[in-house]
Image (tube, rainbow, N blue to C red):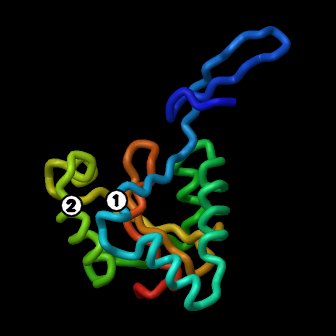
């Protein structure tokens, strides 16, 4: 199996020698804004993992693999969020308000399409790295089309 582009996977039928392109809409995790946010990024994750002698990177790698195995982004997000819904208010939670403010300050073509013409950020969501909204490690991001754009990683769940 080889990737032709992000939405198409090529399968080679060895018995018939045919090549078939199949549209695949597996969800994507996109980390392009993580560095620009100057927030809790991979360097922070590395430092925190060493400080607390935790398994943050293996947990993240496992999450990335399992997340990409879902058929749709909606199913993946539903699986990794709490069954009780999010209790984080983007209007009251200082941590979340700061994330939104930092993202709005990024002025790129890609970031602007996520903000939209009304200057309102699309819904900021968070997912736990364990199914059912379990575990302390949380990632914040924005969904657009079939991608979850990661803006922040919070392995210690210190945003309440």
Please tell me whether residue 153 is drawn above or below residue 15 in the rendered image.
below
The image's mark for residue 84 is: none
Q: Mark 1 points at which residue?
A: 33
Q: In which quarter of the image is residue 141?
A: bottom left
Q: Say which quadrant the N terminus sits in.
A: top right
Q: Residues within 10 Å of mark 1 (few under 14, many from 20)?
A: some
**How far across and down, in percent of the image, does residue 97 sit?**
26, 77
Q: Say which quadrant the C terminus sits in.
A: bottom left
Kindly identify the residue that appears in the image at 37 percent across and 48 percent down.
144
Is disc 1 placed on a helix, strand or loop?
loop
Q: Quadrant of residue 123?
A: bottom left
**How far across and down, in percent of the image, does residue 137 sit?**
55, 77
Please tell me whether residue 75 is drawn above or below residue 21 in the rendered image.
below
The image's mark for residue 106 is: 2
Kindly identify the residue that appears in the image at 61 percent across and 23 percent down.
22
Please tell me whether residue 50 is drawn above or below residue 26 in the rendered image.
below
**How far across and down, in percent of the image, does residue 101 sit?**
21, 71
117 or 82, nearer to the observer: 117
Tell me the distance, in whole angstroms, between the alpha carbons under discs 1 and 2: 9 Å
In the picture, measured across the screen, residue 115 lies left or right of residue 153, that is left
Kindly identify the residue that appears in the image at 65 percent across and 54 percent down.
65
Kindly identify the residue that appears in the image at 17 percent across and 65 percent down.
105
78 or 47, nearer to the observer: 47
């Amino acid at each position: 199996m080889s990737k032709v582009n992000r939405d198409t996977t090529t399968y080679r039928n060895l018995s018939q020698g045919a090549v078939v392109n199949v549209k695949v809409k597996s969800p994507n995790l996109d980390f392009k804004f993580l560095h620009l946010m100057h927030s809790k990024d991979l360097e922070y994750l590395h430092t925190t993992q060493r400080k607390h002698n935790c398994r943050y990177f293996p947990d993240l790698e496992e999450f990335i693999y399992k997340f990409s195995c879902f058929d749709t982004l909606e199913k993946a997000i539903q699986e990794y969020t709490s069954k009780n819904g999010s209790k984080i208010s983007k209007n009251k939670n200082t941590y979340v308000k700061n994330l939104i403010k930092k993202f709005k300050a990024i002025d790129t073509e890609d970031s602007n399409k996520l903000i939209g013409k009304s200057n309102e950020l699309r819904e900021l969501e968070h997912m736990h790295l364990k199914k059912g909204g379990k575990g302390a490690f949380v990632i914040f991001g924005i969904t657009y089309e079939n991608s979850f754009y990661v803006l922040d990683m919070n392995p210690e769940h210190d945003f309440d």
